[in-house]
Image: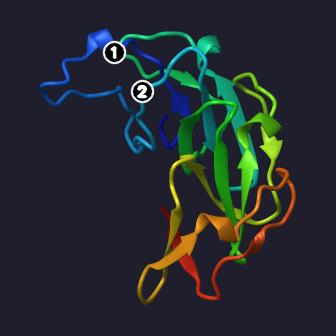
């Protein structure tokens, strides 16, 4: 998935993982946002940074050779992307530092070119959250990284507000 909204699915057999290779052809000014392995049962989730999220079924995406640009997702700007299954959770944090988990299954499958589904107003960060993880790392603008136990956040619907996670301005969530 690229910053300018391109997405490509390729067969792993096309790559030699013993050497450095280009994952995807990029236009000038574009950059990779995410590269991941996936299967036909998975979804690619892309977030535009402005409150819209697309959930695309991997099986619906065309398989392309490694030399291609890929196809357009429908978003002109993507700030984060990840591969997930319907049973997975994603972590959402708003600009005013309210965080929550939302099940991937709460989102319907979109087609490329759709406008996406809305998240809570002011959502700044959207990340996949692995079931086995216990801690969330909040990276503030200044000072030390804040460690937050996952039990401090609850599972809420896609448009609900979450609980406060920090009083300091955050630049990243890991």
Q: Nearer the viewer, residue 64 or 57?
A: 57
- Name the residue nearer the viewer: 71 or 101: 101
The structure residue drawn at horizontal position 41% and vertical position 15%, both measured from the top left corner, is: 10
Location of mark 1 (residue): 12
Mark 1 near mark 2, Cβ–Cβ under 8 Å?
yes
Figure disc tally = 2
Question: Percent from the top left, x then y, of residue 140?
Answer: 50, 81
Location of residue 74 in the rendering, given as x and y in whole percent from the top left corner? 68, 31
- Cα gap from disc 1 to disc 2, whole angstroms: 8 Å
Which residue lies under the disc numbered 2?
37
Query: Which residue is drawn at the image coordinates 45% and 88% (left, top)?
Result: 142
In front here: 46 or 115? 46
Q: Is residue 120 above or below residue 95?
A: above
Instruction: Say which label, 1 or 2, has the lower sequence index.
Output: 1
Q: Is residue 114 above or below residue 131?
A: above
Residue 109 percent coordinates (x, y):
77, 26
- Name the spot of residue 134 as percent of width and height, x first: 53, 61
The residue under the point 82% across, 50% down is 158
Question: Left of 174 or right of it: where is 18?
Answer: left
**103 sits to left or right of 85:** right
Q: Residue furthest left?
A: 19
Q: Could one spot residue 48 in this view of the protein?
A: no
Q: Which mark is residue 140?
A: none
Residue 29 appears in the rendering: yes
Left or right of residue 127, residue 96 in this image: right
């Amino acid at each position: 998935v690229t910053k300018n909204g391109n997405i490509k699915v390729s067969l792993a057999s096309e790559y030699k993982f013993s050497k450095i290779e280009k994952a995807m052809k990029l236009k000038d000014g574009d950059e990779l946002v995410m590269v991941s392995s996936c299967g036909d049962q998975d979804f690619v989730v892309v977030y535009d940074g402005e409150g819209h999220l697309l959930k695309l079924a991997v099986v619906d995406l065309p398989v392309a050779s490694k030399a291609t640009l890929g196809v357009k997702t429908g978003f002109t700007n993507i700030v984060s992307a990840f591969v997930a299954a319907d049973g997975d959770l994603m972590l959402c944090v708003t600009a005013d530092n309210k965080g929550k988990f939302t099940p991937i299954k709460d989102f319907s499958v979109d087609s490329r070119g759709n406008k996406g589904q809305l998240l809570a107003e002011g959502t700044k960060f959207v990340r996949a959250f692995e079931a086995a993880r216990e801690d969330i790392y909040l990276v503030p603008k200044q000072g030390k990284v804040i460690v937050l136990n996952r039990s401090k956040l609850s599972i809420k619907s896609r448009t609900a507000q979450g609980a406060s996670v920090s009083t300091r301005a955050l630049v990243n969530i890991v």
